[in-house]
Structure formats: C-alpha cells, structure tokens
Amino acid sequence: MKFDYIIIGGGLCGLSAGIRLAEQGKKTAIVSSGQSALHFCAGSFGLLGKNGDKTVLNPLEEIDRLPEKHPYRLMGKDRVKRLATEVPAMLQKAGITVTGSAEANHFTLTPFGKPRPSWLTLNGLPTFSKLDEKPFEKALIVSIKGFLESYPAFMVENLEKKGVCCRVETIDLERLTHLRESNFDMRAASIAKQMDRATIEEFASKINSCTGKDESVLIPAVIGINDERQLDRMREMVNNPLYCVPTIPVSVPGLRTQHILQHYFEKLGGTYLLGDRVEKGIIENGSVKALVTTNFGEDHLKADAFILASGNIFGEGIKSNPHDFYEPVFGLDVNYSSNRDEWYDFNFFDAQPYMEYGVEIDKDFHPSLKGTKIKNLLVAGSTLAHCNSLKEDSGAGTAILTGIHTADLAMNI
Amino acid sequence: MNYQEQNISANNFEECIKCTICTAYCPVMAVNPDYPGPKMAGPDGERYRLKSPDFYDKALKYCLNCKRCEVSCPSNVKIGDIIQRARIKYDTKPPKLRDHMLAETDVMGNLATAFAPIVNPVLSSGIAKAGLDIIGVDKHRTFPKYASHKFSTYLKKIQPEQEKFQKHIAYFHGCYVNYNNPSLGKDLVKILNAVGYGMLPLSKQKCCGVAKIANRLISRAKHDAEINLKSIREAVEQDMPVLSTSSTCAFTIRDEYPHLLGLENSDVRSDIMLATVFLSRKINDGEIKLVFRDDYKKRVSYHTPCHMQKLGWAAYSTGLLKMIPGIEFVPLPSQCCGIAGTYGFKKENYEYSQKIGAELFEAIENEHPDVVATDCETCKWQIEMSTGAKVENPITLIAEALDVEATMRANGLL
C-alpha cells in the first residue's frame, strides 16, 4: 500500500505530525502498535516546566539554557515559539479546548494537589497563574464512593499548605452500585463510561446539596470520556465553580484527547492503523523504501517520507537489553552510555540518565544508520535523545512541536 | 545471551507492565461487573493459574474474544489468547446441548438447507423461539434464514466455466455463504470473473471452527481445522491464494489455529486473506482494474468488526468502497457490536451483548446511511436486528456498483 507519508507511532507526537500533513491534503498513514502514553496524561501539556531544580516560568526564554542538542535547541527558539502559538487553534479545530500560552507557564494541580507548571491545560482542570497563588479560598473535595483512584487526604494536605480551607464529601451514585460489586471496575475510565445524562444530573444535584458558600468544587476527572460537552453541561448544573482533578491513569482527559485527535486525523482523510506493528524498515541507498508490518505482511507500506514517532522505552520506540539501548525498527544510531553503571542514578527521584537515551539526529531531524544519514526519515517526540521529558515536564511539548516540525520538514524534502 | 527473551513464556504474559490501558477498551468490562477485565483475566490471572488451577475464575467465560485488549496493548501482550487458552485448559465443565447446537454450524446448516422452506418459518415462530429459550438461546434472537441451495453445490456446477479462466483463486466460503447467503459468494464470482480470475472450490472445507473454539469443543474444532489446512495447502501448491469474505473465518484460520488449537500454519498463513485484501493489492499493483457504474449512488458507513480490527485490514475494505465514485463514505468509530458470534445468542449474554453495542447502534442511527458495510456476518445480524439499518458485505456493494462490461474491457477481457 502506498501513501505520501507514513508515521510510525500514533500518540500525541504521531497524531500532531499526521494532522499537520493531512491538513495539507497529503495521503498520510499512522501505524500504531497499541495505545499511547497520552492515556497517562494528567490533563495538562508541559512545554518546559523545569530546568534542573528550577521551576520555569517563561519556557521560551529558557530554551537557550537547555543542552545544545536538546530538540528545542535544534528547532530554534523562534520556530518553537511560532509553532507553539499555532497549537491551541489546531487543537480547537479537532474539538479540544485548552487554556494557556507559551509566553508564560501557568499552574494546575497534580492528582495529589501539588502545583504543576503547564503550557496548555485541558478544559475543566483548575488553573492559576502564579506558583505561590492560592488556587481557591475554599475547596470542597468530592470523592466518589468506592473509587479506587482518588486521594482526597493528599489533596487536602497539599491544598491546606497553600492556605486553602478544605472539606471532603463522599458521594454515592446510583448507577455505580452495580460497578462496585467488582473489585476491579471502580476506576476512572469505567466510571466515566457510566456517566449518562441521568447520572450527571444526579451527581450535580448531590454536589449542590452539600456545597457551602464560596466553595470551589473539585471532582475526580471522570466526566467527558467522549467529548467536552458533557463536562460543560455538568458545569452548568452545578451552582458553584466546578473543576476536575486528574486521577491515576488511565486518565479520562487523556483518553478523550487521544480519540478526538485520532478521529480528526481520520476525518481529514488520514489512515490510522491501530494494533499493527512495524517489524522492519527496508533501507536502500540511504533512503527508507518500505515498511514491513505484522498485519500488512508482504504488502509493504510505501511512502515518499517517513516520520519515526514511536516513543521511548514505554512505547518500545527505544528498547534495551542488559548491554545496549537500540532502536528496533531501523536500528538507527542511538545515544547511550556503553557503561551500564551510568544508565541509572540510585536515587530514584533524581534525573535518570537513561531517560535521555534516544535516537541521535542532525539539525534537520534526520537520523543516521551506522553514521550514514537517512534522507527521507525524520525522528520526533520522545524517541529523540537529549531530553528528559519527565524531569523537564516537556513530554507533551516535545511531542506536539517536533511532530509538527518534522511534518513541515518532510513536506520540503 | 539475551536474558529477557529467555524469561518470556510463549504467551508473553510477563511482558504486561500493568498499565491497565486494555481495561479501558474492554467492551465487556464496561457493562458486566462480573467480568474481571482483560488484565486480571489475562496476564494477572495467568500468574496465579500457574501456581494452582484452583485460581481459575469461571467468569472468564464472559470474554467475547474480540481481541480489542490486544489491539490496545502497548506492550504487545497476547491478552485475548491468554484468556481463551485458560478457558480451554481449566474450564472442565462439559459444554451444554445449546452450545453444541450453536457450534455445530455444518451439521445444522446441512440439515436446515435441505429443509429450508420448513426450517425458516419454524425457526422464526414463537413456539420454536420459546423452545430455544428454554435451552438457553435468547428469545430475542432471530436465526438467519437458510438458503434452499448450498453455495458449494453452485460452485461445483459452475466449475467447468470457472476453470476456463487463466488465473484462479480458491474460495473459503465458510458456513454463512454456504448455508445462508450464497448470493455473497456469487457477488465475488461476478467481480473476480470481470477481472479475469476464476473461482475454484477447496477440495474439502469445514466450518472454520470459531464457534467450536468459543464453546470449547476443541477436538471437534481441531478435526475440522486439519481438514481445512490440508485443502488450503493443496490450493496454495497450485499457486492459488485462498480468499474469504468473512473477517472471522480469515482471522480464525490465520491466527486462532496456531494460537489456540496449536496447529502450525506458517507455510500458508500469508496466502489466506479476505477478498477485499486480494482485490486491493491487485489494484494497487496495477494488475487489475475495477470500473464502476455512473448511476450508482449510496451513502455508506463501514463498521469495523473486532476481528477485522485485529487483522488490521479495514483500510483495504474501506479503500475499495471509497474507490466507488457514487459512494458517499461515512466513517464510524471502531467498536464492538456486542454479538461476538454465538456469544450474543446465549440467554445469559443477551442483555450485555445489546449494552455493548448500544453506542455503535446510536452512531449508526445518527448517520442514517443507506447501507452499513461490514466484513462479518454476525455483526450484520446484530446491527440489522438492533438498528433496522441494512447491512451488506463490501463485496456485495462492489458487485452492485460494478460496470461488468467496462471492467472486462479495462482488463483486456473483451
């Protein structure tokens, strides 16, 4: 099968690249082996939240202080800025509302109620502009009876540190009675699937009957698994300001974002091949000729250019064995230490060197194979070396921006 | 030495990283709290079952084997296979009379087609439905109508003229085309002949076995599978690909034979494919051309059957439909319709089956297409029963829209 462009990897990065190409009318396919790390998204996208121990307030200004080979440095500050400005409109067209700007980070809450720097925050999550700002005067933290994945006690402790006056209420919803019979079902995604119109009304009215004056209401993010409208409807029904706080994965806002982006890509004419796996890339004369996948077998997938957005260790875009790190599809040159002792830091919470291992690229985002540049292949997102997305809180930003950037570069090959 | 590879079992349950993504995509878990979900039933449960078979949970019977857990798994764990293998290995309760009846599609089909004029009205009568309900077939279900003449008989009859073609394919018609809808097989003959291919029967064919596997009639399934593989090998030796018009038949022969029945098929696996895959590949390679009528106009949705999602071939079927100029194509989200073959016919599953499909039915009703295309016959029954929409195999729509004369001319046959 022949396409103009093929992207390996169907997460936030692959979809951003795919949407960019499909918007230009290019015949684009995305091959995604399983679902992506977007399912772990806590509801906000970081561009650059931390550099070392420092909380970043102005991510664009901070780019020049990143390591020289960091993907943002390779893109250049101006390019990052221009693309970052275009992202909210792209998401809006797909059906995803975000608040925030790359000019200055704002803050949102983690599942434990700690402030977290954010570039773009999804509809429904609380946002506040300054780190030391009190997000609310009074908060009613709503827990759902039997829910396994919310931690109101942590939330209270952390918010109280900020001087927020907190109260916890547990609400029982009729429709969840059946779900609670199981030991496994009281998780965010399962609950979210039960949220029909009547349950939303019941939830809203039970919240209204227990809220006090001036209290902001925080509920676990279990509303709006398919679209944002459900969240908007519920907000209209609740008398006090209502916010969702992220839960432990699988995340409902993450699921929603994945599906909306995939649907938008398909609506633009893109082909999303879920559950297929690229087993081998065929390279001839320094160019990728075709991909061999599990499902298409001898019908090789061909394209003019390819983008590798297959993720890192979690997405199996980068794999390891006791001796090496490697990129499994093409065997591209990977940056890692050959001394195994240097892979880890024994302090679990410190930056782990292996997190920065990934595919080495040139300034045009082309990788190399045994030192030879691959002309029609570009690499994007967490597959890239030299960024520690977890420590920098830059995972979503790198995914979206290098995704769009490589799509533009691919169109100019 | 690769330590990691040596630590992984054949069903790779150790590679589950406990991310729980599969649980968000399990259609059963969303409606039936008695089902522990793919992670618990699959890799987590496997760990316990290896310690003692006493840990086997009989609720695994609620798994409808849609494989959507496998499709969503970022770590490529064969979750669905782990669950089905556990059912086969540890569920020792003998299958019920009802299960035998639903699974013995060849026996039932041969009997029913012989007496179709009597069987059809009887099966749809209230008395028969009440009787079936007692043995556990849900009374809301209507059995598909049986044809009076089997497709296999027709195929034998046209064999001399089919042999005259220079190129041939072998057709695995399966039970549905043979006993219920021979016209789908005839539609494929029409398309193949127009592009210069003759259709030949396999020397012998039995039910693919999916219903027997689902109802744990494993030795019966194996017996049939061995007959099928033997005939498939004969066809492949004569350079004929083996085509199917049912995503489940194709999936079962390609993947369930080795994974669940332990039958080696790697020598012929890539020769077994859906007819839409064969046609698309030939078109893409420039070997054949299809020309469509100008006066054909239809608004068509495509429903991706679970096994089609697992095969990863929906792009072929939708690609062919989109080639038809008169078709306005309306995509649907890929989700389970709830029937899962014999699963939805069972009284204990009926309610869950309808709940699983509810979102899909709503999406179809909102799009109000003239026809829903799908590659699976049981999805067809479920969608027709639950939405009133007309459902056809893509091959039927292609045959309808085909300009036979112009196609023959384009392929140098006239």
Image (cartoon, coloured by chain):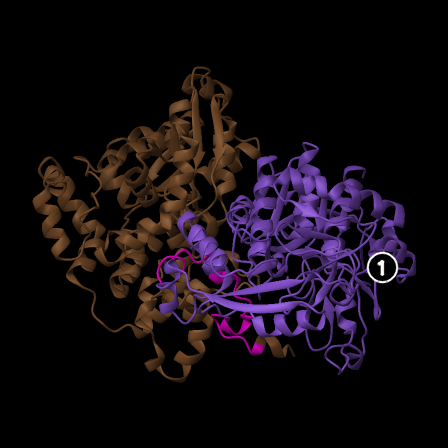
Chain colours: A purple, B brown
Residue B27 versus residue A162: which sits nearer the camera? A162
Q: Nearer the viewer, residue B114 or B242?
A: B114
Indicate whether A408 appears above or below B138: above
- Residue B239 vs residue A308, the one in the foreground: A308
Main secondary structure along the magenta-highlighted residues? loop
The quadrant of the picture occupied by the C terminus of chain B is: top left
> Where residue B88 appears, x then y in whole percent?
32, 69
Image point (20%, 46%), residue name: B140
Pinpoint the chain carrying mark 1.
A
Q: Which residues are magenta?
A: B6-32
Task: Tell me the element at label 1.
Answer: loop
Front residue of A245/A226: it is: A245
Residue B268 visible in the snapshot: no
- Residue beneath disc 1: A70
| Percent x, y of residue B27 | 41, 55
Does residue A359 appear left or right of residue A96 in this picture?
A: right
Q: Considering only vertical position in the picture, is B163 above or below B312?
A: above
| Picture quadrant where residue A398 is located | bottom right
- Residue depicted at 56% across the width and 50% down the height: A256
Which quadrant is home to the N terminus of chain B?
bottom right
Q: Amino acid at mark 1?
A: His
**Is residue B8 rendered magenta in the image?**
yes
